[in-house]
Image (tube, rainbow, N blue to C red):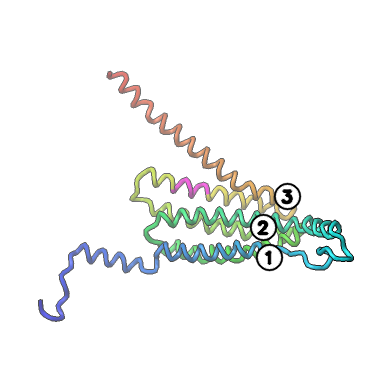
Amino acid sequence: MASGARPWRSADNEKDEKVEMTRAGQSPERLGFLTDAVLAIAMTLLVIEIPRPEGEEFDATPHTSGAQAASHLWHFLVHEAGAFYSYVLAFFVLWIVWRQHHTVLDRLSHVPGTMMTLHFPFLLLAGFLPFATAIMGQHPGNPLAGSLFGLVVFLLMLCRSGIQTEAARMDRLSDDTHRSVRHLESAVSWVVTGYWGLTLLIAWWTPWVQVLWFLSGAVGHAFARLARCRVTLHEVSAAAPDVRERDSTS
């Protein structure tokens, strides 16, 4: 072979190299590492933002008995109940978001541009959530504090639903079972997002809207169960004529 001549490459090899070049910077592993880091930091910041008891009245001293110190600490914990509730709610949201996002990325060979773009507001909102959670926890009776938290979570869910929808669109060449699972997960995500958006309409006037937010997971689970039952009934009804035809010919 003459020096400087290009080595022979098949058309398939060149095609594979072009595919790899177009997917540079679209690795789901690298994006997963970044997302895991941001969500882990956000989850940690949630507990850091919870107020801590400070002062001598919480310590047993010669001037304060153990019973008095325990009473002071108990009243402090009761007073900060809103902060604890907000922490649990926000952690629950981030946990669900992380779990679904982890499932989506595990099924991808590459991350398309639209999905990569959606991750910017997705991670931006996840990093901002501890701030909104701290405000709602410290001022549970303030309607603006609750509305701010609900709005941040709603926008976060919008981004998550968009990511899952893009993942479902990439399943055009996969088998029917795999594709139906993707579309069901995307539909559940949009239903929960819509449910959360509806609760925002009453967040300003009803402080107990936080209870409805906790039920968002149950809403998604119930919708998924109903959708699976409907698919099963459809498959059974579709298979019934074939069974009757085989029985009649036998």
Q: Nearer the viewer, residue 70 or 238?
A: 70
Q: Mark 2 and 1 residues: CB-CB less than 8 Å, in contact?
A: yes
What is the number of the mark on residue 208?
Answer: 3
* Mark closer to the observer (3, 2): 2
Distance Cα–Cα, label 2 vs label 1: 9 Å
Snapshot quadrant of residue 41: bottom right
> Dot 3 surroundings within 10 Å: few (below 14), some, or many (20 or more)?
few
In the shown orientation, is residue 9 left or right of residue 77? left
In the shown orientation, is residue 168 left or right of residue 201? left
Helix, strand or loop under label 2: helix
Which residue occupies the extreme front position in the image?
A: 62
Q: Mark 1 points at which residue?
A: 49
Quadrant assignment for the C terminus: top left
Q: Residue at x 37, y 43 (%)?
A: 176
For the stretch drawn in magenta, what is the main secondary structure? helix
Distance Cα–Cα, label 3 vs label 2: 16 Å
Q: Position of residue 62 (x, y in %)?
A: 88, 66
Residue 151 covered by magenta stretch: no
Q: Which residue is drawn at 38% across and 43% down?
A: 177
User: Mark 3 or 2 closer to N-term?
Assistant: 2
Q: Position of residue 48 (x, y in %)?
A: 66, 65
What is the number of the mark on residue 87?
Answer: 2
* On screen, residue 230 above or below 146: above
Residue stretch rendered in magenta on the structure = 182-188
User: Mark 1 or 3 closer to N-term?
Assistant: 1
